[in-house]
Image: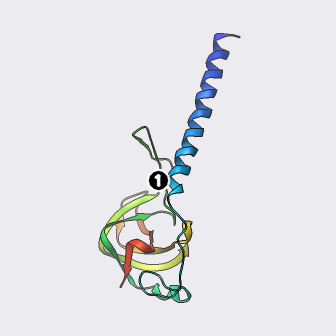
Amino acid sequence: MTTVQKYLLIGGGVLVLAVGVYFAVKSLTNAGEDDKDKGDTDDNGSSDDNIDSVVGRKVKATSGLVNVRSEPKVDNGMTLLGTVIPYGDNIIAERGGTFGTVKSTTVGENNYTWYLVALDSTVDVEGGKKEGYVREDVVTIL
């Protein structure tokens, strides 16, 4: 076996190990998040049947800042040995207070309802974002 073949074999093994660690860490971080049990009402007292009644209404951060995301899912990348690997990061902004108007709703990961929000101010990401998704449990519908 040549030296080049040895290095290729070692490199391939390291790559397989890194991918395995990635998926193991990702599954561990998702293991603590049980699927949300949807009842007849959400946190804001709206029935699931009337979820579209929030369209056109203002949204406010329940407390502190809210992550506004490019997709209706949480994908913050991964931390490996203290280093953040931003693969798949979908946070486009953080907003507090009243920050936009609901355009539509959708059910995303873990059965949470996500609101597509038209933002009151443009976010300077990828040429300017005017909308993004927020999860139902971090905002109040006004």
- Quadrant housing the N terminus: top right
Local crowd size for mark 1, using a 10 Å CA cut-off: few (<14), some (14–19), many (≥20): some
Whole-percent x and y of residue 113?
51, 75
- Is 35 placed left or right of 69 in the picture? right
Secondary element at tag 1: loop
Q: Is residue 108 visible?
A: no
Residue at coordinates 35% horizontally, 85% vertically from top-left?
142
Q: Is residue 100 above or below residue 12?
A: below
Whole-percent x and y of residue 21?
55, 39
- Is 57 placed left or right of 106 in the picture? left
Q: Is residue 122 visible?
A: yes
Whole-percent x and y of residue 32?
50, 58
Residue at coordinates 44% horizontally, 79% vertically from top-left?
102
Residue closest to the eye, 34 or 7:
34
- For the residue marked with disc 1, what is the amino acid? Asp
Q: Is residue 81 above or below residue 78?
A: above
Whole-percent x and y of residue 90?
47, 57
- Is 43 placed left or right of 11 in the picture? left
* Quarter assignment of residue 31: bottom right
Residue at coordinates 39% horizontally, 39% vertically from top-left?
82
Q: Which residue is mark 1?
A: 89
Q: Is residue 115 above or below residue 67?
A: below
Residue at coordinates 37% horizontally, 76% vertically from top-left?
100
